[in-house]
Image (cartoon, rainbow, N blue to C red):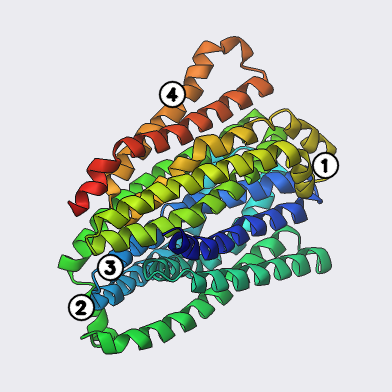
Amino acid sequence: MNRRILSLALPNIITNITVPLLGMVDMAIVGHLSASHIGAIAIGTQIFNLIYWNFGFLRMGTSGFTAQAYGAHDWNEAVRIFVRAISIAVAVAFALILLQWPISRLSLLIFKGGSEVLQLAMAYFFVRIWAAPATLGLYAVKGWFIGMQNSRLPMWIAIFLNCVNIVCSLLFVLVLHWDIRGVALGTVIAQYSGFAVGLVFLLREMKRLKPRTTLSFRLRPLLRESLQWSSLKPFFKVNGDIFLRTVCLATVFTFITAASSRISPQVLAIDALLMQFFTLFSYIMDGFAYAGESLVGRYIGARDGKSLRLTVKLLMRWGLGLTLLFTLIYAVGGEWILSLFSDQPEVIGGSMQYLFWTLVIPVCGFAAFLFDGIYVGATASRTMLWCMVAASASFFAVYYGGKLIFPAYASSAYVWNNVLWSAFMVYLTLRGVLQALMLKKSIYNQVQ
């Protein structure tokens, strides 16, 4: 079973690690321009996180349902699931493009910063928003392949996409001097390139599946059968829960960036660098979480309780091992990692005051990431939602509780940033603890 987990997890880790590496390259490119550019990338990236995280169900719901169809050998349903996901992705993407102006105005109300920071952030936003169809389409493609127990194709798509992005960003910023718009344009070009490659792989897979199905692969009949309300209802039920869960997640992360910007522009830049440590760890852990999605969904679809329990047990062991490894890496190399992101002395020096939080991130966060994959594979979306609601409430309770307990320190940037990071660690920990407590009822009982 460990071999099977690794065969799925390692391609996912390679896939996922290209994402933070891409963000780190973007941060490194603008980090050598000015602190305002660092803050603008932090705000611009968080705007798109807020947008795209809310539609993360296009990947998560797709992978869970597809994995269960794979376990049950229901190839008709596997094809229909993708058609549903990609149809919703396209509709949402074009709505986002049409609504880009009100979205930008709302973003300016949420985030604070100097006029230069916000101007740069908006320049980034109005270019990158045009990647929405490709970005959301890739969610559906990636989720479907993960559900079909194929992690290698998303890996090659991600490697290609991120290589294109890095090359374009370096060319547009360092050679053509297009500033922050060059970083955004590199992302747009890369997303459409990756989506095109993904569709090529997808068409090949559909051609392979066609003899095993009774479906018509003509567009109209396929859409008509896939988008019937009786089929869409459970899809929307699960994905509605995942959507609301992701709204909570995006609210917490958006609040962190907004709160940092309200403390000071320097703290905004500092926290943007420190969050790279969280991002790197989370994407490594998500490699195993995606393996959990594939295997848990497969064994629930096949009604194999023994393999299901063994998968969960081994995933937790891998999580503990990676937690120890990353804590050691951050303890030994934290200052060096910071220096990769920026050469601004005031930002590096300020970040060192808070570097100890990077040692806590793996301990508090590993279980939350792994259980997310397990629950997605089981399509246990309602439990995921309520656990996230409780954890998000704890975040705000700790943060605003700190304001009540330490009113005398209201003007201290150091105190308030530590309160913010304390709230974040409580939030991560509670997500994992609550899902662990609900494991038997929500996951194991599905195969009894």
Estimate the x, y position of residue 188 in percent, counting from the top left: 60, 68
Q: Earlier in the sequence, mark 1 or mark 2?
A: 2
Q: Residue 344's mark?
A: 1
Residue 282, above or below 417: below
Mark 4 residue crowding within 10 angstroms, few (<14) / some (14–19) / many (20+): some
Asked if marks 3 and 2 touch (Cβ < 8 Å), the reply is: no
Whether residue 114 appears in this view of the structure is: no
Q: Name the residue under label 4.
A: 397
Q: Nearer the viewer, mark 3 or mark 2?
A: 3
Neighbour tally class for label 3: few under 14, some 14-19, many 20 plus, Cα within 10 Å: many
Reading the chain from its start, which is encountered first: label 2 or label 4? 2
Tell me the amino acid under the disc marked 2. Glu
User: In the rendered view, would you say 75 is above or below 132?
Assistant: below
Tell which circle, 1 or 4, labels the residue nearer the N-terminal end: 1
Residues at marks 3 and 4, CA–CA distance in whole angstroms:
42 Å
Residue type highlighted by circle 1: Gln
What residue lies at 75% left-to-right and 41% top-to-bottom? 333
- Label placed on residue 225: 2
